[in-house]
Amino acid sequence: MGPTCGALGRRRSSPLNDPMTVSDWWNRTRYSLYAPVYDWVAKPLARGRQRAIERLDLERGDRVLILGCGPGSDLDYLPEGVSVTAVDLSPAMIRRTEARAETLGVDVDARVGDARDLPFGDDTFDAVLLHLVLSVVPGAEQVATEADRVLAPDGRASIYDKFVPEGESPSLLRRALNPVTRFLFSDVTKQLGALLAETTLEVSDRESFLGGVYTVTVARLANSEETGEANRESSVSQRNR
């Protein structure tokens, strides 16, 4: 059994109860089509996914939420003893996640759902995985806000995706390719800082993959002891340079 629905008070925006938009329909349709070959196509990204999970330092009993779970690729790298809930807009992807969980012998609460409007109470999870999802979904800011809401006070979010480096503008090549990449799989002009701007999540550490195109980021709630310690260590490191 996964986490149950609870009070939805903290930092919750208006529910997204509107009928499915064209962009949502296209997301569900294209990833349903990609489902049979997704693991093969995304194989070059597997090492970054594994590293992202390692950096969370998950422990037995931790409650983990996977948003935009796809075919359940993250399940391959999760440690034993964690409680896993997985959400995806595509029923085809959820079926593959369930099949993967059965093969691995892992108990997963996998459900079709909208990552922008989660049916979970505040402070429900110790870790939220946002792997290759923020660059894909429309309204990614709302996904980040919901991840922030459902994280426990000492929780952390793992973000693995391709973003424009902070302080830089999308290159001419990115802007030229984006209409095609956005239609086929994802937006390549997003910046992580802008997506987290309306949340209390702060980046505590970051690691680059595949020549810097992809980054593995751990973000924590601003008032957590871990974030404070990470920020203090960063400040000391900068002073000592």
Image (cartoon, rainbow, N blue to C red):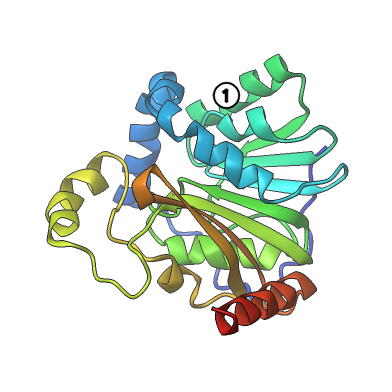
* Residue at x-position 64% and y-position 27%: 76
227 in relation to 102, above or below:
below
Residue 106 spot, x, y in % from top left: 76, 25
Crowd rating for badge 1 (residues with CA inside 10 Å; few <14, some 14–19, many 20+): some
20 or 140, nearer to the observer:
140
191 or 123, nearer to the observer:
191
| Residue 213 in sight here | no
State left or right for residue 190 relative to residue 94. left
* Residue at x-position 28% and y-position 54%: 188
Number of labels in the image equals 1
Mark 1: which amino acid?
A: Arg
* Residue at x-position 63% and y-position 21%: 100
User: Label 1 belongs to which residue?
Assistant: 95
Residue 24 spot, x, y in % from top left: 37, 48
Direction top: furthest residue: 103
Residue 212 spot, x, y in % from top left: 37, 52
231 or 83, nearer to the observer:
231
78 in relation to 16, above or below:
above
91 in relation to 87, above or below:
above
* Residue at x-position 49% and y-position 41%: 89
- Rendering quarter of residue 195: bottom left
- Give the quarter of the figure containing the N terminus: top right
State left or right for residue 114 relative to residue 161. right
Element under label 1?
A: helix
Residue 148 spot, x, y in % from top left: 63, 67
Direction front: furthest residue: 241
State left or right for residue 213 relative to residue 86. left
State left or right for residue 1 relative to residue 103. right
- Rendering quarter of residue 240: bottom right
| Residue 142 in sight here | yes
